[in-house]
Amino acid sequence: MRRSAAALLLMVFVPGCGAARRGIWLVAPRQSEAERLAGEADNLARDNSPREARDVYLRVLHDFPDDPAAPRALYGLGRLRVDPKSSLRDYAAARLDFGRLVARYPTSAWAPEARAWHAALSELLKHEADAERTRGDLEQLKELDKEMEER
């Protein structure tokens, strides 16, 4: 019995000792408070609680602007604002969020997608502005046409 216990202990500790001699420690990284909050906000967004998710994302950005979770929070905030089902949908604000992410955290894992969202939203907003100008021009033409008919 003692031999099997000793053998079991050796099997458990010997591989760990070899890793320790090579400078490798098998310790799970501790999650930062910002990372925990960003995960909570992601869950709130997924559970259709966009306002609560927004508030938690904003807290991460305010309290932990230099934490690696900050770009994740900014990306999540932008996604809340482009979600067609969200009560927070605001393409102009989302464009600003994605632009801030690219400017402040250009090497983050979220930057390439944020750059694509920023470009797509820029085009969308430009076309919406063009359409609004065209509608205004059309209304003016209708008024001019009406005046011409009255003469």
Image (cartoon, grey):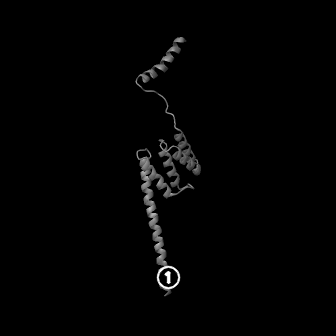
Viewer-nearest residue: 4 or 55: 55
Q: Residue at x 44, y 63 (%)?
A: 127
Q: Residue at x 41, y 47 (%)?
A: 106
Which x, y percent locates residue 5?
A: 53, 15
Q: Is residue 97 above or below residue 30?
A: below
Which x, y percent locates residue 47?
A: 58, 47
Which x, y percent locates residue 113?
A: 43, 49
The amino acid at mark 1 is Lys
Q: Is residue 113 visible?
A: no
Q: Which residue lies most toward the bottom here?
A: 151
Q: Is residue 93 visible?
A: yes
Task: Tell me: 118 left or right of 85.
Answer: left
Task: Tell me: 15 left or right of 85.
Answer: left
> Counting other residues with Cα less than 10 Å from the Cα at mark 1, is it few (<14), some (14-19), or many (20 or more)?
few
For label 1, the SS is helix
- Which quadrant of the figure has residue 126? bottom left
Q: How many marks?
A: 1
Q: Residue at x 51, y 17 (%)?
A: 9
The residue indicated by pointer 1 is 146
